[in-house]
Image (cartoon, grey):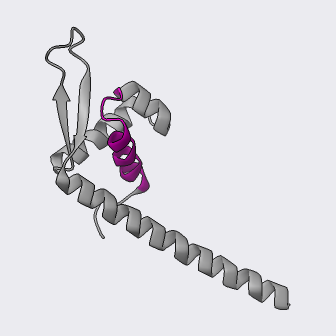
Amino acid sequence: MKGKLLNEKNFSILRKLYSNPEISQRNLAKTLRFSLGKLNYCLKALKNKGLIKIKNFSESSNKRKYSYWITSKGLSHKSKMAFYFMKQKMKEYEDLKKELERNEKN
């Protein structure tokens, strides 16, 4: 997978939104340790790529309250990213294991 959206930040956002689509931007930013500006930038990028939809609660008295929905394209992308990161971590594990085995022989 290539592209700017293939990074752990966007993967973290998609995971959190999947588990809690009504989380506030402020709480999401706090949870992920992002600034609000950085989170807003990432959310707009995910929206522009068609990976999430952002909806305003029209019935709510708080017009700044939004819900974030991962699209089917977003779910597919999230799954691909999870597989990619797991594959990457497994390679790191295998490399570390080989390094430790070499050190034990010396």
Residue ID at (30%, 70%)? 1
In the picture as drawn, the residue positioned furthest to the front comes out as: 19
Q: Residue at x 71, y 82 (%)?
A: 99
Q: Is residue 65 above or below residue 94?
A: above
Q: Judge left or right: residue 89 versus residue 15.
A: right
Extreme bottom residue here? 105
Residue closest to the eye, 105 or 15: 15
Residue 82: percent from left, percent from top = 39, 62
Q: Residue at x 26, y 20 (%)?
A: 65
- Magenta residues span 8-24
Q: Most prominent secondary structure in the magenta stretch?
A: helix
Residue lying farthest to the right in this orientation: 106
Q: Determine which quarter of the picture holds residue 47.
A: top left
Q: Position of residue 7 (x, y in %)?
A: 39, 57
Figure quadrant of residue 20: top left
In the image: residue 6, left or right of residue 53: right
Rendered position, 72 above or below 94: above
Q: Is residue 65 left or right of residue 97?
A: left
Q: Is residue 5 visible?
A: no
Location of residue 71 with respect to 41 vertically, above or below: below
The answer to whether residue 10 is visible is yes
Q: Quadrant of the C terminus?
A: bottom right
Pinpoint residue 83: horizontal percent, then vertical percent: 39, 68
Left or right? Give the position of 102 relative to 57.
right
Residue 64 inside the magenta-drawn segment: no
Magenta highlight on residue 17? yes
- Residue at the limit of the structure toward the top, as seen here: 61
Q: Residue at x 19, y 48 (%)?
A: 71
Please state the horizontal and vertical placement of residue 92, each as a whole percent of the image.
57, 74
Q: Quadrant of residue 66?
A: top left
